[in-house]
Image: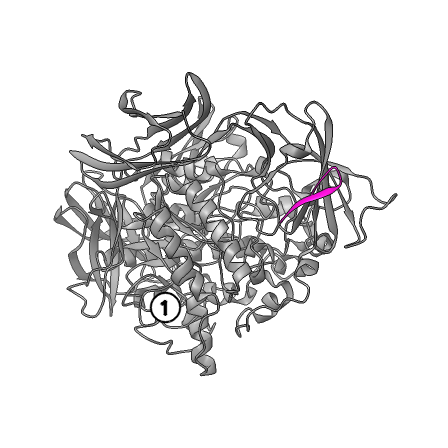
Amino acid sequence: MSGGSSVRLDQWELRDFDPGAGPVEGGEAWLAVAAPGDTYLTLVNAGRLDHPYKARNEHAAAWVRDREWRWRTTFVAPEAGEGETVELVFDGLDTFATVYLDGAEIGRADNMFRHWIFSVGDRLRAGETHALEVRFDPTAVALEGKTPPPPWAAFTDRISRSKRNLMRKAQFGWGWDWGPDLPTVGVWKKARLEVRPRARIDDVAFTTLTATSARAETRIDVELSGTTAGLRTEIVLTDPQGRTAFRQERDAAETAPIPLTLDAPQLWWTHDLGAQPLYDLTVRLLDGDRLLDETTRAVGVRTIDLDQSPDPDEPGATFFRFVLNGMPIFAKGACWVPTTSFVADVASEPYDRLIAHAARANMNMIRVWGGGIYEPDLFYDLCDRKGVLIWQDFMFACAPYPDDDAFVASVRAEVDHQVRRLRHHPSMALWCGNNENEAIHRIDVDVSGVEVPLPGAVLYDAVVPGMLATLDPTTPYWPGSPGGGAHPNSMKAGDVHDWTVWHGIPPIPDDRMVEPFGYAPEKIVYQRYAEDTARFISEFGIQAAPALATLKRWMDPADLDPESEGFHLRIKDESKKALAMIDPVTGPPATLQDYIDFTQWTQAEGLKFGIEHFRRRRPHCSGALLWQFNDCWPCVSWSLIDYDGVEKAAYHAVRRAFAPVLASFGELGDGAVELWISNDTQSPVEDRAVIALTTLDGRAIWSEEVALDIPVDASLSVWSGVVPACDDQVLTVRSTTGAYEANRLLTVPVMDLKLDARARPVMTARVVDGALEVELSARVYLAFVHLVSDRADLEFSDNHFDLRAGETRNIRVTGASPVTAAEVSVRCWNDRIAEA
């Protein structure tokens, strides 16, 4: 948005003081900091703090949260014309802030998730220098004397210490089961002075009401403020080819919505179903020929609905499926956490690369998790351009929240700001009230036997949906994830978080949890995903270590041992769970490399197993969003891509399992096996599937061809047989036309396979236009073949796969700079057997 003029406030200084003592002479020097900026990293750069991510430094940074921080800058006051006003605008202050201009308090802030605007025109003298200072109080001081709602048995200690549920601040900053305890502070988004004209454009909304390839009914809403008498607005919609699709001028006093019919509209689709054409909507506010204000937004023409109709084939159950432009889709994706704990560190935001990774992994949806932040505009712009839908949580997670007037008022301002900022994005598919609050509360009630209302329920059941009914009525709303059934995590309706694999409780069939949590290997083994008959799985996942090179970049050499205290500090959840999960799959690790390989193999195989099961259940299951896509720091977690950007084995397993057409084997017990073809495309699949059972050294036992005719949006069983468990055989399927990737079924755990310890991949490599073209081939069966490098910027067209006897596979390796053969090597499971 433009209008008047703007003065950027991006060069600041910061310093810490004893809370409440006020500025004093002497002590530490003021440190230069950019805005947006992060206090921790400023201290690191100044030598006052060791990087909290390195070695065992996290807890050494705990003093930062207990200090009073002051940020200060100066500016030359701009000239304001007749009728113009000057406003001080902060896009984000983190979190309890008092703002001073020339030593006088002009306002306060207490919500990280909204912008703050202070009128300062009557305090400024054009051309003169003024001093601006922001005091950030420690959260403990700001919340002194305030008591959170009665706690749950789960998370009690952590919430009681931080009181995080009393503040509108990134909840994960106080530590999570994958993230460090590093609550941030400072001017975390842009700051500026704006000279505003006598009237301005406050907001522009574009809404698709109905849409087909023939016609779309849309609506444009324009909100103005100030003195609009004698002014006019110009509204122009330009199609993706730059042609004017609509133009209208009207008196600025007119406020009615503008209905707009588009013939033969260019519909926005997810990348797996079509193109992502974007229209440009420009609104100008004019005084005669003089431009007072202008707003331009990229918008898309699409409809999105949430189908919760009864499932006729599963009595008592309902669907939970997204319908894009009238087409039911299977949502394939992952949950997103902040890219770093230092959320103001814009220099390290790897959004372009990560969103590209998601699309390359055949994901069509990302869930922005409710314990993090509302992501920056770039994130949503990239999802628009790359065809990835967004499930957007509001920022409430795993806690009982207050519902007093002041807290509700703060939430209202936050919701108003964020919905207006994001609602025009065609990628926005769902607004969700919170993460896990209803479910954890229900578990707590079931365990205690005391029925009490959910604290904060008014936010998700009344406040937020009431506002959305006005601000964004066409985007679906969901009160909380998981939710929807008689129990919030019921498999009969809504979405579920699969707490069986990893937490060890059975899936909840209807209205209550039937067993307590438990972590014995047989309770958390990944094959239990087959028990899940949910409608939509919005969280499921398995932990795995990051790449060895990532650990070496951040950890002390002495801590590169799975038994060391420093290594355990990288595992925020109970570290023994990972060992219990891998034990029946790979056996216990003896070295750090074992730990990395075993956890990555188990994560890859487990997520492959789960996704294939969920996709075979289409349409009864209509979505699988795994936990989690990325990391906020270098650690052992559920992520597919580690903090440094290195793809784990599971990334490639998930990419293959999310392919538009999938061939997968389902085991039914006692050696019975079915082959399913899942088709998520808009075209039927006509093909022949070649199913073969071979020994690991390549000898054929039998093979069979099956004709395929799979309709659009369907998942069908096309073959069944009996394949007894055997440690030297593999069952495979391949397409005769390349309609889908080959797949395989191992009937015993990888640790029991009779692999040839002497066998290795034959690797040849050549550099072509700065990329490395690698060919790998195998004489006998090789498991877990993968290319590795110390470089974190490399991307692999394929990786982490098995090679059958006689098979050859080609991989393209690219990076930010040219890649050489010396920087890449190959490993496989057979190496580990030889080393053992």
**Which residue type carries mark 1?**
Pro
Of residues 89 and 169, the one nearer the viewer is: 89
Q: Which residue is mark 1?
A: 488
Q: Is residue 390 left or right of residue 734?
A: right
Secondary element under disc 1, as helix, strand or loop, is: loop
Residue at figure coordinates x 81%, y 53% from the top left = 21
Of residues 668 and 477, the one nearer the viewer is: 477
Q: Position of residue 576 (x, y in %)?
A: 54, 67
Residue 761 visible in the snapshot: no
Q: Quadrant of residue 165?
A: bottom right
Q: Position of residue 668 (x, y in %)?
A: 24, 66
Q: Position of residue 655 (x, y in %)?
A: 36, 45
Q: Quadrant of residue 214?
A: top left
Provide the residue span drawn in magenta: 100-108
Q: Kindly give the residue lying farthest to the right in the view shown.
A: 26
Based on the picture, tell me whether residue 34 belongs to the magenta stretch.
no
Residue at figure coordinates x 47%, y 55% from the top left = 370
Report the predominant secondary structure element of the magenta stretch: strand
Based on the picture, tell me whether residue 103 belongs to the magenta stretch.
yes
Q: How many marks?
A: 1
* Dot 1 alpha-carbon crowd within 10 angstroms: few under 14, some 14 to 19, many 20 or more: many
Residue at figure coordinates x 68%, y 24% from the top left = 126
